Image (cartoon, rainbow, N blue to C red):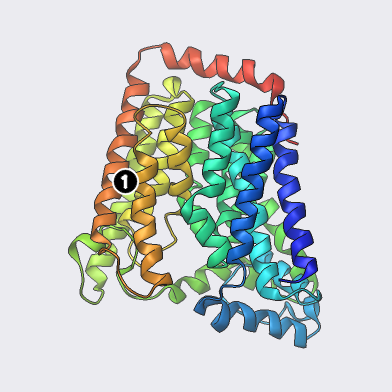
Amino acid sequence: MDFGTCVLLGLEGCFALWLLWRSALLDTKRALWLSVALTAGAFVLRAYCLPYETLDYRDFLSKWVDFYRDNLGFRSIAYPLGNYNIPYLYFLCLFSYLPIRDLFLIKLLSIFFDVLLAFAAMKLVSLLGKSTGLRLACFFTVLYLPTVVLNGSVWGQCDSIYVALALLGLWLGLTDRPILSVLCFTLSFGFKLQAVFLLPVMAVLWLRGDYKLWHFALMPLFYVLLVLPAVLLGKPFLETLTLYSSQTGSIGDGLNYNSPSIYALFWRSPATKEAASLGIVGAVTFMLTVLLFCLIHRRRLGLRAVYAAALLLAAGIPFFLPHMHDRYFFGADILSVVLAYSCLLGIPTAPLMQFASLLSYHAYLKMRFLLYVDHGARAVIGVLLLAAAQLLFDCSREGENEKLANSEKTALTKNENLL
């Protein structure tokens, strides 16, 4: 690992500590030195993982950066390349100019968002007024979470980017900053299509009164601004707007790709259109059921109920959808940690989600099954049942949650600053 990589990795570690300091979590010597030690450990672990190359990097990411390097970087962004959306391609173009090895740069980008991911989860937990110790525990739980370390530092994937932005959007929405919230959700969707598993939580925020209806009109505006640089560099405007629809065929025709979805329980044969269509109907029905419940109980949606609903959506939608891949439950992994630090019923959801996701990660990274992913699917069912129970419990307390939701907003917005 070269000197430049070490410097950038060290700066990201300093950034993590700065976020904790800005959040007033390093006020004591004990908290400071413990945080320094844990941050150092998290980044040493990631440094150890950086040289590892996966087939995804060798067959795709490295070739895309080489293409930009050989074709004048940003000037070649107009060419159709890969199956990532424009914002991520901006970074690949940037990397093509730098002398540091692109493998390290790709992973360092994901590690930067690992930090923001931990920060966003910690901020969501802090809205409930948890102690300094619990907030620090949440931050470092996410930073050390096996799927978080494996996803970016080992695999070189970018799931931490879209999930971190979505969780920041949720936090901003809950702290009366709806425009910034919509911007973060738009950026999340702009980086990766799988953000659609998290976007329905925006409807929950609207039902609570955190959004006005006109805030949703900002999404297309923000999205156009996001892809505008590529359009100015020659990318066809219509192509940038329809990129996701043209990429849906690249996810494959199989009902399941080592994901802990419902198809891991029942189908092990080649895909059928009927089964795929049934799954899509099931996912839409599930999402609408959760949102309908939130609509009926909109005056009693406290923070724990919002977190439970968000986890239900992030885990339930990909659970029913066909063609899901091993990493598509990443948002549910993080939201399960948020719920675990928010309520007793949520505590088992985090280990259950990690168990489910790690079985899928093992299947790809080791090219063999530790256990068949149907065990992971059963774990996801357990997560859905626990999250549903928490949502029902919170909304069953007549009149209590409405008062709680209002007091949470007013009391905690005083000391919640963006950065």
Please tell me which residue lies in front, 153 or 213.
Answer: 153
Left or right of residue 392, residue 417 in this image? right
Query: What residue is at 66 percent from the left and 49 percent from the top?
Result: 40
* 294 left or right of 105 in image: left
User: Which secondary structure, mark 1?
Assistant: helix
Examine the image and state in which quarter residue 157 appears: bottom right
Image spot of residue 268 (x, y percent): 21, 71
Front residue (pair 345, 191): 345
Is residue 406 in view?
yes
The answer to whether residue 128 is above or below residue 178 is above
Residue that mark 1 sits on: 286
Q: Nearer the viewer, residue 175 or 43?
A: 43
What residue is rendered at 32% in x and 54% in y?
Answer: 319
The total of numbered circles placed on residues is: 1
Measuring from the top left, give residue 5's x and y in whole percent.
75, 66
Can residue 114 be seen? no
Check the picture and name the quadrant holding the N terminus. Answer: bottom right
Q: Is residue 104 above or below residue 397?
A: below
